[in-house]
């Protein structure tokens, strides 16, 4: 009898991406609305994606097993 495959978390697979080197990439929060009070420099910084911290990496890898 074949083993059942794990399901990927739908929300996580839309938000996290695995790089070629195996690191997990994500987009920063806070760049969708209420931008008037933020400086231009801060908004530019929020546009860019970043690498996920090692602290959270194990949990996120469990949510996206096949990426």
Image (tube, rainbow, N blue to C red):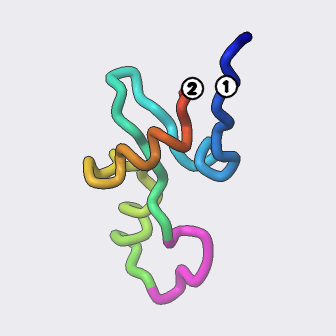
- Compared to residue 12, the image places residue 17 above or below, namely above
Residue on which disc 2 sits: 66
Task: Decide whether residue 33 is among the magenta residues.
Answer: yes
Query: Within 10 angstroms of label 1, few (less than 14), some, or many (20 or more) residues?
Result: few
With 41 as the anchor, is 67 left or right in this view? right
Relative height, residue 18 to residue 30 (above, below): above
User: In the drawing, what numbered circle is on residue 5?
Assistant: 1
The residue sitting at 27% across, 54% down in the picture is: 55
Q: Position of residue 57 (x, y in %)?
A: 35, 45
Residue shown at 32%/23% (left/top)?
Answer: 21
Q: Position of residue 10 (x, y in %)?
A: 69, 46
For marks 1 and 2, give the one nearer the viewer.
1
Q: How many marks?
A: 2
Asked if marks 1 and 2 touch (Cβ < 8 Å), the reply is yes
Density class for disc 2 (Cα within 10 Å; few <14, some 14-19, many ≥20) is: few
Q: Which residues are magenta?
A: 30-37
Q: Quadrant of the N terminus?
A: top right
Given residues 5 and 58, the one toward you in this image is 5
Q: Quadrant of residue 22?
A: top left
Residue 5: x, y in percent?
Answer: 67, 25
Residue appearing at x 64%, y 46% in the figure? 9
In the picture as drawn, the residue positioned furthest to the top comes out as: 1
Q: Residue furthest right?
A: 1
Marked residue nearer the N-terminal end (1 or 2): 1
Most distant residue in the front direction:
1
Q: Is residue 35 magenta?
A: yes
SS class of the residue under badge 1? loop
| Residue sitting at x 47%, y 89% | 37
Describe residue 51's horizontal placement relative to residue 8 as left or right.
Answer: left
Main SS category, magenta section: loop
Residue 31: x %, y % from top left: 53, 68
Q: Helix, strand or loop at disc 2?
A: loop
């Amino acid at each position: 009898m074949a083993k059942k495959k794990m399901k990927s978390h739908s929300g996580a697979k839309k938000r996290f991406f695995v790089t070629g080197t195996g690191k997990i990439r994500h987009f920063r929060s806070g760049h969708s609305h209420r931008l008037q009070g933020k400086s231009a420099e801060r908004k530019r910084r929020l546009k860019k994606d970043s690498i996920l911290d090692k602290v959270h990496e194990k949990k996120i890898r469990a949510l996206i097993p096949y990426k």
